[in-house]
Amino acid sequence: QKAEWEKLKNEATVSKDGKHFELASNIGTPDDMDGVLDAGSEAVGLFRSEFLYMNSAELPDEDTQFEAYKKVVEGMNGKPVIVRTMDIGGDKHLPYLPLPDEMNPFLGYRAIRISLDRDDIFRTQLRALLRASHYGQLRIMFPMIATLDEFRKAKAIFEEEKAKLVADGTPVADDIKLGIMIEIPAAAILADQFAKEVDFFSIGTNDLIQYSFAADRGNEHVSYLYQPYNPSLLRLIKHVIDAAHANGRIAGMCGEVAGDQVAVPLLMGLGLDEFSMSSTSVLKTRSLMKTIDTTEMAKLADRAINECVTNEEVKELVEKNVFGN
Ligand code: PEP
Ligand code: MG
């Protein structure tokens, strides 16, 4: 089977009925680029930039970050690279950046909330990203956006730093797309309004499931509530995809569900444009996608959303109709 998948390395990702999907990799450091190229990924859909901070003894300076982003962008040779700005907090800590002791760190001071508060750190990162944008197709994504105000503030800081670099004569791309992670239910629900201002969405199912089902993603006692096929989640995802498309935007996904073999056919039916996952899942998923008819899947997704009521029912529906068991 592995040998069969290998043959797909240089092929585009196309469904049985000829629809193209973008199959991308999630990475944590520039060293992961070997895996991305080996898998024949069409993009980097999520560069978790916090690993640059976690693998350092102090805040990484602008030049250090610039080199890391440039390496990834150049490695992709013109294909898109989505860098997510620092997503620290929750379960990810930096020894040199003490965070408050919190009762609920996953509901606390993290990600864009820190970046907007500590805009010195945020500006350094944005400047490094802006400089790297000159070397390929770089896109920037903000994590843990809950409100449109947060996005507008982040974008305003981005525009300020961009203007400064341009005034200095530093080359920066002038078409950098700015997107957000959809991983907080408030943002998912308001996706139709976000889509008017945000260039692209990437659905972060790891957190979106955690917050939708109110179940800590790392707590084994409530792990039964990790329900990636639950119609409730599927409805939310459909709403996000439809809102993106109604405004001519791209909807992607970079949580674990994007590479889940039961979810992938349903997501194709719902019209998700981009699937970003661990590089080791890319060829297997491309192989599956080639066998899927999107018109049929649109009907199946509709049944999953409107007729099924549990996670298990959806799973069985897909297993029976797609995998014949
Ligand atoms: C997610 O929440 O789904 C996601 C991709 O981000 P992370 O797993 O890094 O929180
Ligand atoms: Mg997340």
Image (cartoon, rainbow, N blue to C red):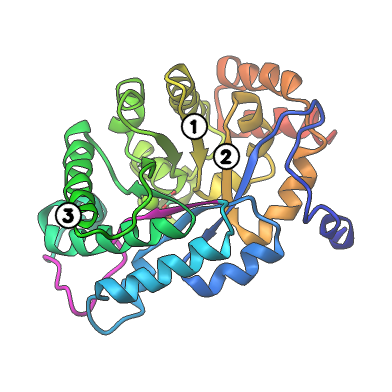
Kind of residue indicated by mark 3: Lys
Kind of residue indicated by mark 2: Glu
| Residue picked out by circle 1 | 250
Secondary structure mostly taken by the magenta-highlighted segment of the chain: loop
Residue pictured at 78% horizontal, 54% vertical: 10
Residue pictured at 64% horizontal, 17% vertical: 303
Instruction: Please tell me the numbered disc located at residue 57.
Output: none
Q: Is mark 2 on a helix, strand or loop?
A: strand
Q: Give the range drawn in magenta.
A: 80-100
Specify whether tag 2 is near ligand 1 (CB below 8 Å).
Answer: no
For the residue carrying disc 1, how many other residues have a C-alpha within 10 Å: few (<14), some (14-19), or many (20+)? many
| Residue picked out by circle 3 | 164
Disc on the earlier residue, 2 or 1: 1
Q: What element carries label 1?
A: strand
Q: Tell me the quadrant of the picture where the C terminus can be found.
A: top right
The correct choice, above or below, for 233 with respect to 218 in the image is above
The residue lying toward the viewer, choosing from 47 and 147, is: 47
In this picture, residue 27 sits left or right of residue 151:
right
